[in-house]
Amino acid sequence: MANFKVNGEDKALDIEPDMPLLWALRDELGMTGTKFGCGIASCGACTVHVNGVAVRSCVTPVSAVEGQEITTIEGLASAAAGTAQPVATFDPANSALTAVQQAWIDHQVPQCGYCQSGMIMAVSSMLAQNPNPSDADIDSSITNVCRCGSYPRIKRAIRSLATA
Amino acid sequence: MKINRRRFLLSSAVVGGGVLIGYSATRPSRHRRANEELAAAGENYVTSFLKIDADNTVTVYVPHAEMGQGVHTSLSMMAADELDANWELVNIEQAPATDLFANGDLVTGFAGELGAPSFLAPLISVSAVKIAELGNLQTTGGSSSVRFTGEHSMRYAGAAAREMLIDCAASRWQVPASECTTALSHVHHNASGRSLTYGELAADAALLEPSKEPTLKTREQYNIMGKAISRNDIPAKVDGTAPYGIDANPEGMLYAAIRLAPVFGTKLVSVDAGDVLSRRGIKRIVELEDSVAVVADSYWRAKMALADVVSVFEDSPNASVSTDSIFAQFDASLASGESDEDRELGDSPAAFESASDVIEASYRVPYLAHAPMEPMNCTVHLHEDGTAEVWTSTQDALGIKSRVASILGVSADKTTFHHSYVGGGFGRRLPFTWNVIDHAALIAKEFNVPVKTVLSREDDMQQDYYRPAVASNFRAAFDASGLVRAWENRFTGPIQTPGAAHIPYAIDNQSIRVVDGETHIPIAAWRSVDHSQQTFFTESFIDEVAHRAGKNPYQFRMDLLKDHPRHQRVLQTAAEAAGYGRNLPEGHALGIAVQESFGSVVAEIAEVSMDSNLRPVVHKVTCAIDCGFAVNPDTAASQIESGIIFGLTAAMYGEIKIEGGAVANNNFPDYEMVRMATSPEIDVHILESDNTLGGFGEPATPPLAAAVTNAIYILTGERVRELPIKNHKFQKPSLAQV
Ligand code: FES
Ligand code: FES
């Protein structure tokens, strides 16, 4: 039995301990917001938070998250509302989205959108640890692939959050 | 047949019929069929693309796939603007995969421009599909959606609907139609102060036939087009709710992992599945002609089991083919002297004979994969009652529907296509690149539950339809006064995009010819098609010619572009914006390139330096595009940024390696991409002109590679003639004499 919390809910799954968290989320729990891109920790499409920290779920066996708190893109806004906001000026009362998600809309970041769940999870985790990242910080901590090339807009969106 | 509203929105309407081209050229007209076949009580299709409800909401049905190019929003803007709709009251929906919404205008658009839809041309010749049949596709490609469907269908639909609404109001008020005006989803009769909403008129308007020649607005009359409007697909893409094909999750679904013949074109000989069938969740091993699949109750279980299935594929004479042997074959083909005309101008042999100086160079580029972010996938459910359902991300819903139906042996009328967003296309999800679709249908045929077939990243890398590898040999001749008199180019085909190797430069004698470049590697359209390779070649070699002539590469181009004012305008704009000629930071240089493709003319200037490891760093790309008119300028800018980064990935890293007749690359670590740290600053300048609308999705990709390598030449004196740049071993940096 694998036991962990996803977006605040207890989950108990009768699955192999070496099944990657990505497939437990997508195929066992039907939570498809977390994406499969490469399966080898190279692209970041599958990024989720484990206890608030970004993790690539395609190479994280469920045995490694036993008893842990998982947050996925579907639960990001409610998780942020219950804890410290990554960006102090954002008012969750007026939005079902986090500041990062809202910035993604304001800057029209997504194109095909397939990488963006992972991007938003990675950026949210970075901003929680480093609310005012330099360009070099952004370059070194956001290593996800966006085949559509939304990087310039991602940078703009992050900067708007950092200076807010 | 009547389909209720709920079912229409949830799945797709299913109607039969033949090829329909143009919304108004059909009998019975599309809008009448839409009203008869699709509309529920109280709903009115005023044209086949527009529905107006009694509460005055307008729904625009967009017949193209949303891949992030913003087409749902842009096409709706075009229809809504001509309709004089209130944008706040406009809903946007994906048109169902039926021939009511087939884009014959795409076909006629391309036919008018090039004689055939160029991105389909190589495939048409191999598959013997006739142009007429293409009217039955719902294809999204060739930067065509706004240019053809938008210009020829959506705007006409909006304008015709507006005239129909005016006619109804005029007859209700017993006033001349010419006294009525429209604004914000209302018809007004100013003389009497009366107004009606479109919703109040829609039921009557739906009984009229749309005019074949409605009056379109002029640009000054646009209220919605030309504004930066937020895309309607974005909110669902930030909270994980946007559905992609790979997210299909129908009740009782199984999953297939598949191994296709590594050497293209070979057949499966034998399979040893060991104990795999006894493992948890494994349902069946499916052997197909060219592949073996494991079907299980989870993708991960299927994939793990497949790794332990031993399969043998037949031998093939192609099993010795490698990247090196392919380029050797190309060189032999180029040396053979056998070639076909692409373009001949003047008398180039004579010009070479009397030349005072001749410059020669050979260029080549490797195969490239599309590698869209969403791995290839397709879910198929063959029901016991002979109906079928399909879920996949595609650039061609209608084509996929018929394809799957024919493999399943059911009628397309009984097949439902479920639309989703597309997690990247770039040509991989166009018609005729059908491997996953065919396999998914063949596998699902053996089950009566839905089966989702997914290609892993490795599978997709090795089983794509690639951008062709090309070799291109050039010569140019100068006369005694140093003027360039002749341009000769021999390149390996096939030509997928006629005209991509042509140059806009005023050189009197030109001989551009194609030689055989056929291999067993499957090829297809790849973002911007032939323009991506050919522009690297031509814009590099013209730069070589400029340097040999002792001219500044910018001024040299401007002088030879005297008959191409659009090219001159974008070059000049980009040069001014990039500060061409200014004092650059120490160790930086600017490289330039320009190309016209898909109706737009694009100039790019790359600012590059070499780092301490002698690797090039692209700091900034300045881009100027003449696109005629940008329907949604912010979406256009994001497509241009995207095209530049796509081109930069190809230029810096892109290389599919062939070994043993198969693709040797596996995953992103050996098919590297530009990421945040290597993504340059991008400055986009959109220039409008009187020209017809140009595309945005593709035209920014072609000039990028040459812009970068032209800058590298200035920095190092070394000419990169083979991509990717990462393979070039640079010597010590030294500023070349320009
Ligand atoms: S799918 Fe996990 S990093 Fe790519
Ligand atoms: S938006 Fe398409 S991959 Fe990032």
Image: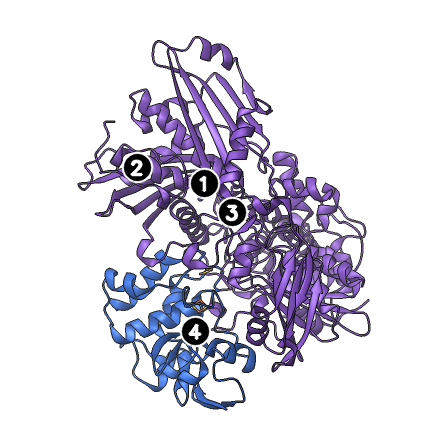
Chain colours: A blue, B purple
User: Where is mark 2, residue-wise?
Assistant: B711
Chain ID, mark 4? A
User: Where is mark 3, residue-wise?
Assistant: B527
Whether label 3 lies within 8 Å of ligand 2 gets the answer: no
The N terminus of chain B is located in which quarter?
Answer: bottom right
Whether label 4 lies within 8 Å of ligand 1 gets the answer: yes
Q: Are the residues flagged by discs 2 and 1 in contact, CB closer than 8 Å?
A: no
Q: On the same chain: label 4 and label 2?
A: no
- How far separated are the C-alphas under marks 2 and 1? 16 Å
Residue B364 located left or right of residue B264: left
- Whether residue A101 is visible to the viewer of this picture, yes or no, is no
Q: State which mark lies toward you, 3 or 4.
A: 4
- How far separated are the C-alphas under marks 4 and 2? 40 Å
In the image, which disc is placed on residue A31? none
Residue A6 located left or right of residue B426: left
Q: Position of residue B366 (x, y in %)?
A: 48, 42
- How far separated are the C-alphas under marks 2 and 3? 24 Å
Q: On the same chain: label 3 and label 1?
A: yes
- Locate residue B587: give its quadrant: top left
- Locate residue B249: give its quadrant: bottom right
Q: Which residue: 61% across, 40% down?
A: B118
